[in-house]
Amino acid sequence: MKTLTRTATAALALVTAAAACTSPAGEAGPSSPARRPLGAVRLVAYSSCDDMLAGLREHAARTVGPWGFGGPMLMMERRDTAMAVPQAKSTVTLEHSTTNTHEAGVDEPDLVKTDGARVVTVTGGTLRIIDAATREVTAKLRLTGDDEPAFLPADLLMSGDRALVLLRGGGIMYKSIAPMKSDTRYVLVDLSGKPKVLSTIRPRGQYVDARMVGSVVRIVTRSEPDITLPQAKDDATDAERRKLNQRAVRTAPAGAWQPKVEITDASGAKRELSVPCERISHPADYTGASLLTVHTLDLARGVTDAGTDPITLAADGDIVYGTGQSLYVASNPRWWPVDPAVMEDTAEPVPDAPSGTAQAPIDDPTPAEPTVTATNAPKATRTPVIPPEETEVHRFDIGSPGPPVYAASGKVPGRLLNQYSLSEHEGHLRVATTVTSDDGERSESGVHVLRTSDMAETGQVGGLGKGERIYSVRFIGPVGYVVTFRQVDPLYTLDLRDPAAPKVTGELKITGYSAYLHPGGDGRLIGIGQEASEKGRTMGTQVSLFDVNDPAAPRRLSQLFQKDSGSEAEWDPHAFLFWPKTGTAVIPLNSYGPNTERNGAVVLKITDSAISRVGMIEHPRKRQSDMVYQPGIQRSMVIGDAIWTVSDTGVQVNDAASLARRSWIPFS
């Protein structure tokens, strides 16, 4: 996943700008940010490489600043094989939990997977297979080189005897120097015997996220133009630097934008594929500085030319949400200031367009009525222009075999929190956003309902949490739950049965907030977050059980509070385990108070009316150099009658009833 760092940064920017208001939910008042009616966005495919090159060059030239495009540039990897799929071993599988995902039947990448017979993890660049019955490591495979960092982040997906490991590497690069090769790659591994690499995939771009339905994985990549920008003189002004960069952009070839993928098979043979220009589409409003590519990989078939057939949009994206029929990629608005260079007079003659193409001057935005902006207004009157806070959402149809089909795009005001801000239900997409005024003084949240066929808005409800921002969202069928926070935590319940008239039905105000909401059974909702003082100061982890049977009167039935602590489950739902069969919940817990520093996982019993603490699972302390530390637990699973927990130092097995330790499996 992933997008959590970006979300946290955006959240920090928003929370510092929030101002308290008291208007009732659903009502717009003078303290509300201006609402912008938005809706469907039509995308158009380029007709040829000349057409694509003309459009991307000019849009990118408008975007580039004195120091480049200002974003990270990463590269990725793929491989190919035509090997037949081995059949899974005949092994006794135990009843087991799976990765906590947003939608049933749609798997998400994570650092550990189990099929009840084995546990597969990827840590420190090494894939390990653990036999669930003997609780022993039966095989391991090093996926990184000696010159790569041991902490290289990685996730995996597993189907049968195939695993796809997603290694995310690379770092920030400045586009004024030569492009830097990244170590991000996707590795397809055969698990049927001794694990072996079948193929490795290295696309040019930054891994965003992936989803798997059945054995078919859709991988979303974000790429930037591969353009080496000139080195300006040390005393050059920003305007001069920007002009140099614009000239470089306007002479860059089509290949600088075309997404590429290098595929290496098991024998080491390599080949490179490029996305055809005709398979790249664009909206009317785009920057040319980023492209989204969706690749399809069927783990049951391996990597083939057809299996990597991509679709690309000239758009941005950082949040992925998937169902069995749709894949959504959303682009949150940027929260950093506008480049000061757009305030300067940097227009220059535009070179002739390629034969047969139309090209507009750089300061002529789009073929529409004349618009005065910061870049085309007379120099004496130019003022900073803050881009509107809007989120684009692109939908792909993945209901049929083969590559995805672009379906539609939409736009809503405001910013998403994460993928749980999106939910598809009965032909409509519900989108929860927070809108902040241009001056940063006012904010409110709301839910927009878009028709999935064309992504046009059919209805919306706003006015949630005036002066606050969204901390968590959960949609369950025709009902929505939204938590906003600044000093107290309003939990809103929403009736979404009528897509044209969504409405708020109830509200519960308590101190603190829930950062993750999880279905807890009939009429119950579990919240993981932080308790806070009445002034909004956080105090430690809290787990809440809500009764939401009556949408007009939600209430909290029970609360467990751990002072001076935090949980990874607050920002990563994969860290949360709930086993409905026994009402067992497990969450990582890190305590940081004076003389109380402990890392582990707290085990809870959640009934229909109460939350109780069962105990704490902790991994053995580890010595590193002259320091002894206790590793934090990242994930937990139920396999048979045991709870399995995973940290970066090993896997531990505890009895689910007594919590007595059965086994410790170190990563050595």
Image (tube, rainbow, N blue to C red):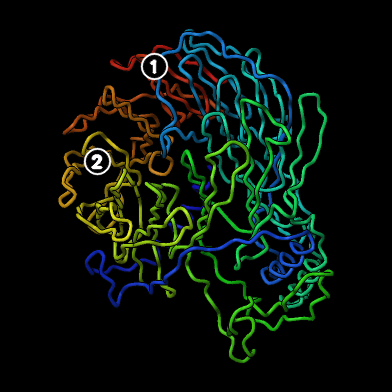
> Is residue 121 something that shows in the picture?
yes
Q: Is residue 30 left or right of residue 340?
A: left
Query: Residue 537: x percent and y percent?
Result: 30, 54
Residue plotted at (39% across, 39% down): 569
Q: Nearer the viewer, mark 1 or mark 2?
A: 1
524 vs 618: above or below = below
Earlier in the chain: of badge 1 and badge 2, it is: 1
Query: In the picture shown, does residue 18 fall above or below 186?
Result: below
Point 27% across, 22% down: residue: 582
Q: Amino acid at mark 2?
A: Ser
Q: Amino acid at mark 1?
A: Glu
Residue 105 % position (x, y) = 44, 32
How far is mark 1 from mark 2, CA to CA?
27 Å
Residue 278, percent across and down?
72, 54
Question: If the image is split into quadrants, where does the C terminus sit?
Answer: top right
Residue 195 in percent (x, y) is at 65, 18
Q: Quadrant of residue 143?
A: top right
Q: What residue did someone put label 1 on?
A: 95
Q: Residue at x 45, y 28 (%)?
A: 630
541 or 433, nearer to the observer: 433
The correct choice, above or below, for 407 with respect to 107 in the image is below
Tell me the residue that label 2 is attached to: 544
